[in-house]
Amino acid sequence: MNYNDVLKSARENLNGSCRVCPVCDGKACRGEVPGMGGKGTGSSFMENITALASYKLNMKVISDVKEPDTRITMFGKEMDIPVFAAPVSGTTLNMGGKFTEQEYISWVINGCHKAGIYPMVGDTAIDSFLITNLEELKKSSKNGIAIIKPWDNLNVIEKIKLSEKAGAFAVGMDIDAAGLITLSLHGKGVSPKTAEQISELKKSTKLPFILKGIMTVEDAVLACQAGVDAIVVSNHGGRVLDETPGTADVLPEIAEKLKGKLTILADGGVRSGVDILKMIALGADAVLIGRPFVTASFGGGEEGVSLYVNKLKADLKSAMVLTGCKCINDIDEKVIY
Amino acid sequence: MNYNDVLKSARENLNGSCRVCPVCDGKACRGEVPGMGGKGTGSSFMENITALASYKLNMKVISDVKEPDTRITMFGKEMDIPVFAAPVSGTTLNMGGKFTEQEYISWVINGCHKAGIYPMVGDTAIDSFLITNLEELKKSSKNGIAIIKPWDNLNVIEKIKLSEKAGAFAVGMDIDAAGLITLSLHGKGVSPKTAEQISELKKSTKLPFILKGIMTVEDAVLACQAGVDAIVVSNHGGRVLDETPGTADVLPEIAEKLKGKLTILADGGVRSGVDILKMIALGADAVLIGRPFVTASFGGGEEGVSLYVNKLKADLKSAMVLTGCKCINDIDEKVIY
Amino acid sequence: MNYNDVLKSARENLNGSCRVCPVCDGKACRGEVPGMGGKGTGSSFMENITALASYKLNMKVISDVKEPDTRITMFGKEMDIPVFAAPVSGTTLNMGGKFTEQEYISWVINGCHKAGIYPMVGDTAIDSFLITNLEELKKSSKNGIAIIKPWDNLNVIEKIKLSEKAGAFAVGMDIDAAGLITLSLHGKGVSPKTAEQISELKKSTKLPFILKGIMTVEDAVLACQAGVDAIVVSNHGGRVLDETPGTADVLPEIAEKLKGKLTILADGGVRSGVDILKMIALGADAVLIGRPFVTASFGGGEEGVSLYVNKLKADLKSAMVLTGCKCINDIDEKVIY
Amino acid sequence: MNYNDVLKSARENLNGSCRVCPVCDGKACRGEVPGMGGKGTGSSFMENITALASYKLNMKVISDVKEPDTRITMFGKEMDIPVFAAPVSGTTLNMGGKFTEQEYISWVINGCHKAGIYPMVGDTAIDSFLITNLEELKKSSKNGIAIIKPWDNLNVIEKIKLSEKAGAFAVGMDIDAAGLITLSLHGKGVSPKTAEQISELKKSTKLPFILKGIMTVEDAVLACQAGVDAIVVSNHGGRVLDETPGTADVLPEIAEKLKGKLTILADGGVRSGVDILKMIALGADAVLIGRPFVTASFGGGEEGVSLYVNKLKADLKSAMVLTGCKCINDIDEKVIY
């Protein structure tokens, strides 16, 4: 099995819910929520791609870089590359119905572990999905991170406890899901939260707490003040609010303000090792990747997932060689043209 | 009936006069006047879309916003959302001929009322169309606004009187219709007017008087000096002069100069709740929406219209939640990236 | 016969040498020289369109403009609109071979005269074409202008004399034809000229002398010093040098330097009355239009040509109404957004 | 045989590995490495085209330029135009398999010589390819330049010696091949080099030494300090690192810093005489052209290659006539708009 085979199978197995386009840029699937697309005109998804593509790289060929080290340590874990599989759930609703949530998440979890990285698992309107995801996490000694929707705090804290029991090494909340159509379809109550409410969640657990869905310096500063351990600069893949900037547009100013004060993660349009390198250069400590893990798992199961991660690893290493970076810490604004 | 059904029926009922494109952006119908397109190259229509799309939104998820209030009061009326159905007439000439002006306008009027907003009705070269529109307005206790073409003042004043008798709660003139091809096809005399002539019209009625078709600060200041109660920043959907800027390009400077001195309305490319939010943030007090009401009414009659308005309402509310706005007054330049 | 019929016939009669695209923008025919396209990548043709489209118009509806006067007087002649048919020759080589040079030019000459404007006729590698063109000019009492290629001066002066005898009321030279592929195909010698050589040509005749093909302030100043009566800001429709700016890009700085010191004409991408208005606002005294006269004449003969000119007239008048211009002299930079 | 015939045959002979698009811009073949495309999204290839196209030319028609001199002398050789065929190898891997490396390179070498320019020949993971290339160079008294991959220095020096023996009049290294996928497929070790290592290579030969793959001022200065005779501003046709700027974006600042201190060559998207003129105007002393030589040779063998070079010559001459340049030295920033 090679990566092209994976894409070919994915195209069949996703039943049209994702076309597995040559470039995954949000055009073909615009407006498809439920589905794999961006909300409304799809512009927030597309801006993620456009924003990242607007940064160009300084090639550097006169150097002594030969075998760059792509590893980092985060939340106490060593990772082969600074990448997490993003929490993506709602298999039956969004991904064509051929595979179950359990099949999908087990492939992502095991494929990530096999290739030396960790998965985040997600939460939906259907409570049993998080349970399934946590059960699958628990089966593996390596485990992962659970990201919970912004229900009322009591409900969230209950799910944080479930995550702790399942052995998750960090937990978080995708607070931007307050605008998620697929939740309102099920009549569940989600909403933004105040800094005080976020602080209460943070204090409810000894695990690192991650706040996902930050798109402004103002919210990033509030999150920092609320005591979270990490933020994810994210517009939820363009699925919650139409017409936001791309994440790579806002990441640099957020990083400039908060770099070193908390862990900064970012997602949105990351597809390749070059994209990972760019996000790190723009200020992220690590990235999350979403849709490509759906493609990889639907196309090749566990093996498809690890194949994709290894492809990222080789691509990132090659990009580090040609930009003169010996390790992840070397990657900074100097590599951006 | 859901909104996709409405679009599907509309595609059939409009007989090719509008293709009901996935994104209504003026490309497929460029030059189709008569028809639903923009004049000439269609660039003024397309610029409306491009201008609005060029503004991006600051997502704000750390807040205490849960159930935003989308209501406003304007011209003495409370509205569920700050939206009017724009005056669109000439059904038989422009919309494929399947439905009559009377059918079309009754659906728009009743659908709007049902969903908590008000319609504007329009005037054409065929005098009976305004009569029909006013008759339909009169049937409903909620009524609406009549917008009259820039005939000579005597003729306009006569039509203002007819509107008063029909119970309209405001009247106005789409002065930019001075350049409308479809009128000259009927040999009727329309023209720009001086500030004095506009002042005379304003003084002829006790109703609020709206001047529609303002695209420069200079004209906006003259309109204000002439005493009008409201202006509509509008290029007539791109149907009167090819190659104007988009309305969202010129709105901010007009609002900066005149905000608070008169009511500022705007139209041009507004399709969704996010677009409404943007126009308000750029300085409008409320917006007008045109072509989507044609699609909604031709596709689903009165029910199609109210379905569309309720879709806008949900979308606007969701956008307010994710930008941290509790009420319409909260929406300002801070939400623009 | 209406203008759409003309376009439909043109599409057939041009035998694929021009596709008569909905928007004539140089994309479909890129590289087709011989043919109707721009040279090489076609970018100089396309830039003409892009440059003009980049200017947007200030709509002005509060005014006392009702019936604008579109006439001007130039080279002692009154014209209904400030437009010349550009010199286009080489019918058999470039336009599909269905009609002769004589048929084509007689339609253009007579159609222009009928509609109140004047034609320029052109010169090619085949000497008899200019002879034919001059004979057709002579048949009409209204006559026109002859534009000669940059042969050696003796040859040019001879052709100026022929033009005088044929009754032309002005003569000129399209000096940028020094780069024309279709001439080198016939082994004829054309070249740039020094200011002294141009001065010699100017002095050889009592007729106004026009230099066509100016794209920089530097060349415009030299042309002025050489004593020419008029320049045409032109890149020869993109047919002589690939990758120039659009004419509307360079016109404003040329006009700023030389306005009033000589007559400034411009061509390049002018299709509509709005385009004429823009070119005048950018500093031209009148414009030349090329390819649309080929379409109009191949599609409708003399009637097609006058139909097109009358369409321009109505469109220009409408654009003047909506930008607040009472006469051509009123059109200035204030109409540009 | 004319150039259109060459393109037609090339389309067949390349077996789909190159579509021979009307404009060779990297879109159709994006990601095709092996193959003829750019790596990953193909953006580095496409940026080369976009960057060059972003510069427009000042047309100059009032001048005394009639027969421009397109010749230069470089590395002791007189060339008809300032163009080298770029080193392109890996025929069997990248070009559809119809012709052998030996056939291909002999056509390029002999076609270049016949038309008055010189070829560069390349090196791949398969050692015998360089041998073949050098044998073909040796057959011709005019010879050419050998460009070697960045193996360890001992290996490179050995290949430099082979090149000297074959009569190459200059040698070089495409150091950016450190990121070439097609090499890693064969498990060969390539890597960036330090300035000291480059200096050692330079000192190992009396031939001029060229370093190819410079994309920053920083690397250009290091190369200069290492004593190389020439650099090639190049991103390897977009085949080694995705998402670099175009070469024409970075050339001006590199030239500003180093012009006159060493020879500056550039490649990347050069297709026509106008492109050559632009690159010279932006600071290059001469250019390399890659993919079009593949098309020309696969389509017309030796004759195809010389036909293409003569086309460039005519096109460059015409562009020099219309920009007022009598010789290559006249071409400077004044021709750029």
Image (cartoon, coloured by chain):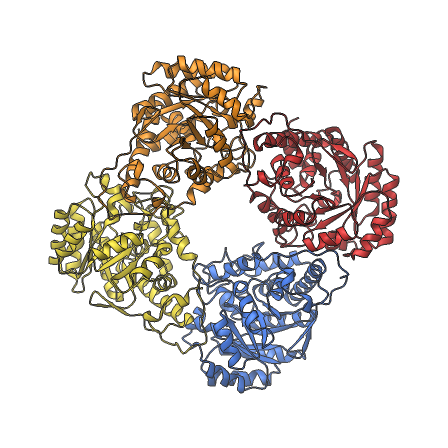
Chain colours: A red, B blue, C yellow, D orange
Q: Seen in the image, is D145 located left or right of residue D64?
A: right
From the viewer's perspective, is residue C287 above or below residue D258? below
Name which residue lies at 31% across and 50% down: C235
Residue A298, image quadrant: top right
Q: Is residue A17 visible?
A: yes
Q: Position of residue D127 (x, y in %)?
A: 50, 15
Question: Residue C11 versus residue C182: which sits nearer the camera?
Answer: C182
Residue D171 point in image, percent of width and height: 42, 21
Name the residue rendered at 75%, 56% in the picture: B62
Please tell me in which quadrant of the rendered image residue A162 appears: top right
Outermost residue on the front side: it is D225
- Counting labels gives 0
Q: Quadrant of the N terminus of chain D?
A: top left
Q: Residue A24 versus residue A29: which sits nearer the camera?
A: A24
Could you say where residue C294 lies in the image, as x and y percent from the top left? 30, 53
Residue B135 placement: quadrant: bottom right
Residue B108 in percent (x, y) is at: 62, 70
Q: Is residue D100 visible?
A: no
